[in-house]
Image (cartoon, rainbow, N blue to C red):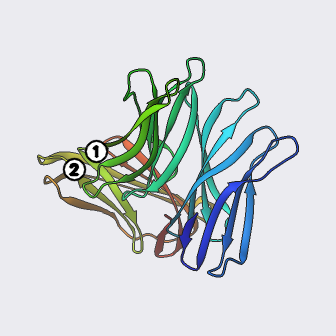
Amino acid sequence: MTKAVDGYVIVGQTDAVDGMGNVWVVKTNEAGEVSWQKTFGNSDLTEGGICVKTISNGYIVLGNLYDLNGTESLWVLRLDAEGTLTWDQQISVNGTLHGTSISPTTDGGYFITGSLYDMINYISDAYLLKLDHQGATQWDKTIDLSSGLCDEANWGIQARDGGYVAVGSTGDLNNWTGDTFILKIEAEKGVVLDSVTGRFGVQAHVKNLGTTEATDVSVSIKITGGILHRINVSYMETISIPAGEEATVSCKPFLGLGSIDIAVTVNGVSSDYEGKQLIILTQVES
């Protein structure tokens, strides 16, 4: 459950006679009265909601998918303020993957904790995952803390310095012994795209997280779409960014109307955004 602006949002799983439940999301007001409720899933998989967080203009939901063979994977759902699905992403790896928490990050992405299970040997490793703003995987880490025992990452959050903190448990299921752990992953280094904004044109905000000046940083912005696909704007610039600072690359205002796609590439790494063009005003969706 998470606190919303005007109430609460609860996530769970529906029940079914054949066991094929779905992710269940319920929005209530401050008094606990249901404002809306939605289910997500299909008849081929069993889905269950694990965690929900309030984000800009909606909610991000972490769920688990179970196939008929018992294999488990992650399911991330982005909902708008009314509970309508805007995008979803399924994350599978070589093994049984169980998610435990999801939290937003400062770059508009998400940090996920969980566990990766070896169901043959009955052991597990802590699993950490970073997604971008559209649910694409940026990096993941599998961490064995106990040399062959059961490690589980139960909760995580981004630290103030840009790194990531996870809390979990490690133990021996055969002897019913275990410990609690807390671990820290250092912040990403180098040049990263921090955010993209609009209004008059499109602005790409790029940060240098390194300890030395970044030179010859290539930033390109491409906007396409609009009614009858009449919008096709490109801009590229090479810049330098001092250590620990931010620079903004701006594409000039352009005319158009309708939905647009925005692709921003920083040193060969691309990020995609959606937006709307209202004559000369550009709106970038989060």
Rendered position, 168 above or below 37: above
Q: Residue at x 45, y 24 (%)?
A: 149
Pick whichever, 153 or 180, lies toward us.
180
The x and y percentages for residue 130 are 43, 44
State the residue position of label 2: 209
What residue is pinned by disc 1?
A: 188
Mark 2 to mark 1: distance in Å? 7 Å
Look at label 1 and name its amino acid.
Glu
Cβ–Cβ below 8 Å for labels 2 and 1? yes
Local secondary structure at mark 2: loop
Left or right of 162, for residue 138: right
**Residue in the foreground of this view, choosing between 10 and 192:** 10
The residue at the point 55 percent across, 18 percent down is 121
Residue 70 in view in this figure: yes
Q: Nearer the viewer, residue 130 or 37?
A: 37
Q: Can residue 139 be seen here?
A: no
Residue at position x 39%, y 53% in the image: 157
